[in-house]
Amino acid sequence: MSGPKLFWIDDDDRLTPLEEGEGRFLLFPGRELEHHLTKSLRGRIGDSYPFCRPDDRHCFSGRIVSLTPLTLDLEPDHACFRAAPSTKLGLALAPVKGDGFTSILGQATMSGIHRVRPLLTDRSVVEWGDRSRWQGKQSRFRNLVREKSQLAGRTDRMILEDPVATDRFLNLSVNDAFLWFDENRAGTMGVSELLEKVGMLSGFPSFSGNGACLWGMVGPEGGWSQTERELSHSLESQGRLLRVSLGRLTFSAEAAALSVVSLLGLVLSSFLESRDKSHSLLPD
């Protein structure tokens, strides 16, 4: 992987609309973007690069027109635009020790996960309930999301949400549906059965998918508590949760989270995209 597939236009960068040409701008890069374009890529007048505004997914082709100050002429690149999916994909997990969460977050970003929510579970090994500790990590995590998004060519900004207790998370997400991954295989379904259900979203009779989020939930190293499992049974009876097993082997919390990220971002997303396309072809 040689470098970013595109560059994000962020708060440090300045855009000035041009009168000629609808949707055209002059871009005056901030310090970080300017350093990358001029020092790392050794950009010269006439060189072109792809850009996007991650908050509205608009894409541009930018051509350097001045080096002092560094200025680029941006033209809309409609071929790069990707509409937001009708169903978002989320990962809710108990944070793991060391650099494990960083690894999971990077993989989730590059796999197209839309939302990540750390969970404060009954058996959490890492405690982020202290708001100041979490806030001290946010800047590093958001920089990682930006870096991995640009490497992957991602045109939207993944949402990194504040840590919350499991029961509160489930109560906050009243319009969403959940895949509860459990090392206790009793009453769970395998991945193959899950794919059959999620392909048509038949496993979620109360889940419309229109703007809602389908969450993969991964517990801590010590597993879900009995109290938390009772929460999952309650939502299961409401048609909003499927309990899933990753198989006979026991995974570490990090390995389980990375497996769920791959399942969500690389497999389930293709089912949901195919469904969106088939619905868009239906007559009104």
Image (cartoon, helix red, strand yellow):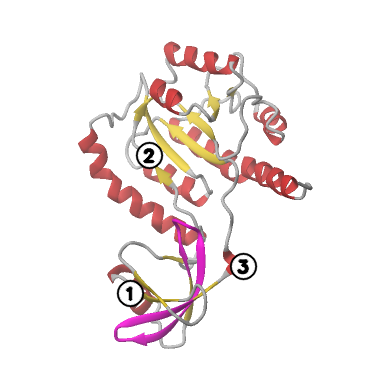
Image coordinates for residue 231, horizontal then vertical, percent? 48, 15
Question: How many other residues sit within 10 Å of disc 1, few (<14), some (14-19) or many (≥20)?
Answer: some
Task: Point out the stretch of residues depicted in magenta.
Answer: 51-74
Do the numbered discs 3 and 1 sit on residues whose CB atoms are within 8 Å? no
Residue pictured at 59% horizontal, 47% vertical: 85
Q: Is residue 107 above or below residue 79?
A: above
Instruction: Estimate the spatial distance between the alpha carbons at disc 3 and disc 1, rounded to whole Å.
Output: 25 Å
Q: Amino acid at mark 3?
A: Ala
Camera-near label (3 vs 1) is: 3
Residue that mark 3 sits on: 79
Q: Is residue 55 magenta?
A: yes
Instruction: Estimate the spatial distance between the alpha carbons at disc 1 and disc 2, rounded to whole Å.
Output: 29 Å
Residue pictured at 51% horizontal, 80% vertical: 21
Q: Amino acid at mark 1?
A: Glu
Residue that mark 1 sits on: 34
Residue that mark 2 sits on: 161
Camera-near label (1 vs 2) is: 2
